[in-house]
Image: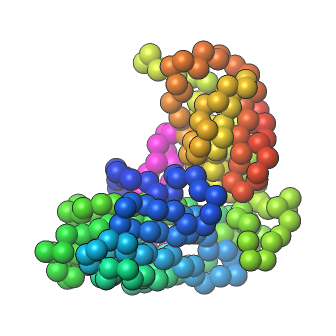
Amino acid sequence: MRIHVRLPLVVGLLLATQQQALAAASILIWPIDPVIESQQPASALWLENRDAKQVYMQIRVLGWQQTAGEDDYRMQTEVVASPPVATIAPGKRQLIRLIRQTPVPAGQERAYRILIDEVPLKQDAEQAQGAQLGLNFQMRYSVPLFVSGDGVWTKQDYQSPRDYASASQPKLAYRLLQQNGKRWLEVRNQGHVHARLSKVTLQGKTLNAGLLGYVLPGSQMRFPLPAATGVASGELRAQINDNQQPVAIPAY
């Protein structure tokens, strides 16, 4: 079953230099970019309650695709969160294991979104655990998750560094569009892994100094251009995934 979900707060689209991010004043979530590589059965996600009151959290994993330039989410059972619900006391942490249930084919990558909902405490555990996406929540956080097949890796291992030149890379191209009086940057990814685009410039002019967004493998995404850009063509450059040096993206 496919569903469309509006995400009020997207933690995964925060550009951070460390492997943690303050998602809100009360909840600390890290890492903000978890992965499950081919040799790993699971990955870890930590939630820390920095509030003065107890919080009740529900954690779900949705399949993530991109269709017609927009994000598309679906229910799935390939990756599960354990535990799916957690009550976290003030100042305490909760480990959430993201467990892969099915393997990813060699040379491929699957994308998911982890939804973390802060549920009003007046709703009991049974209601929250059995609820669907329409559940009443106080705050929603969203974190991207990528699961790799054999021969694929995209994220640097900071405990055991590896040569990033051997990382799997997306295959990108772009074009500029104008529709309904608005200008768009469309980026196409014909590679086998996702692209996280940050520090994007067009003909030397900054389009986004932080994180622009993601383009999943075999997909294309549209990003609105600032009205004052005033550039009709030129060289598009961006930092891609963990590559610290901007690279040129060709036009198509």
Q: Identify the residue at the far left of this view.
A: 122
Query: Would residue 246 be found to the left or right of residue 2 on screen?
Result: right
Query: Would residue 252 be found to the left or right of residue 67 on screen?
Result: right
- Report the residue at 47% width, 20% height from top: 182
* Residue range of the region highlighted in magenta in the rendering: 64-78
Asked whether residue 221 appears in the rendered view, the answer is: yes
Residue 122 % position (x, y)? 13, 74
Q: Quarter holding the C terminus?
A: top right
Q: Identify the residue at the far front of this view.
A: 52
Q: Nearer the viewer, residue 141 or 35?
A: 141
- Report the residue at 47% width, 43% height from top: 70
Q: Nearer the viewer, residue 151 or 20?
A: 20
Vertical relation: 178 (above or below) 189: above
Q: Quadrant of residue 188?
A: top right
Q: Nearer the viewer, residue 185 or 67?
A: 185
Vertical relation: 18 (above or below) 93: above
- Report the residue at 20% width, 63% height from top: 136
Residue 189 % position (x, y)? 66, 45
Q: Quadrant of residue 193?
A: bottom right
Q: How many circles with numbers are drawn on the protein?
A: 0
Q: Residue 69: say if magenta.
A: yes
Query: Would residue 36 be found to the left or right of residue 60 on screen?
Result: right
Residue 39 % position (x, y)? 70, 81
Question: Which secondary structure dominates the residues rendered in magenta?
Answer: strand
Q: Quarter holding the N terminus?
A: bottom left
Q: Residue 125: say if magenta.
A: no
